Image: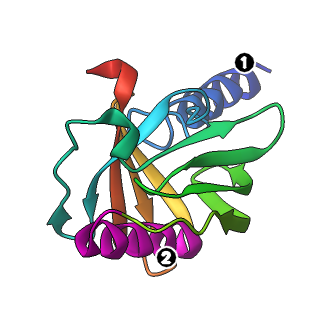
Amino acid sequence: MRFFFLTTALLASLLASGCGSGIPLDEPIEGPIWQLEQLGSELIEPSSDPRRNAQIQFDRSSGRVSGSGGCNRVTGTYERSGSTLRLHQLGATRMACPNEASTINETQFFAALQSTASYRLQGTSKLSLLDASGRTVATLSNVGAR
């Protein structure tokens, strides 16, 4: 009986620790506004106008994701289980962006969202979106954690 309790306690401890990562697998990504910092290996400079920064936010109660590519609004649904993250039914407005660079970054950001298969958190301040091969397609920062 003692062995059973010891084994159960050890298993619960491993599950709570996220298999040694230090971050539980069910660490919430919901709530904060996540602002784009990097697309693949390309750093994205924040705009002086916060409304022009690419960002997303996950809403647990509705299962919806919403945000902006810096020019156009995006919305859709998402499913999250452990570190798996899938975004579905993404749609965006079709307004003209102020310059070609904004259009390119926005298109790449929306493509990164579409290709997301999982995520990785670094504390509560950084969110990396990963594609099916585990490659980081976008890195975002928690606007409220700065």
Secondary structure of the residue carrying numbered label 2: helix
The tag earlier along the polypeptide, 2 or 1, is 1
Vertical placement of 121 versus 16: above or below? below
Report the residue marked by disc 1: 2
Q: Is residue 101 magenta?
A: yes
Q: With 60 as the anchor, is 14 left or right in this view?
A: left
Which quadrant holds the N terminus?
Answer: top right
Residue placed at 57% from the left, 29% from the top?
Answer: 16
Q: Magenta stretch?
A: 98-116
Main secondary structure along the magenta-highlighted residues:
helix
Residue 108, percent across and down?
39, 74
Q: Residue flagged by tag 1: what amino acid is it? A: Arg
Residue 38, percent across and down?
25, 58
Residue placed at 35% from the left, 61% from the top?
Answer: 138
Residue 130, numbered circle = none
Vertical placement of 108 versus 65: above or below? below
Secondary structure of the residue carrying numbered label 1: helix
Residue 77, percent across and down?
76, 55
Q: Is residue 146 magenta?
A: no
Colouring rule applied to residues: rainbow
Report the residue marked by disc 2: 111
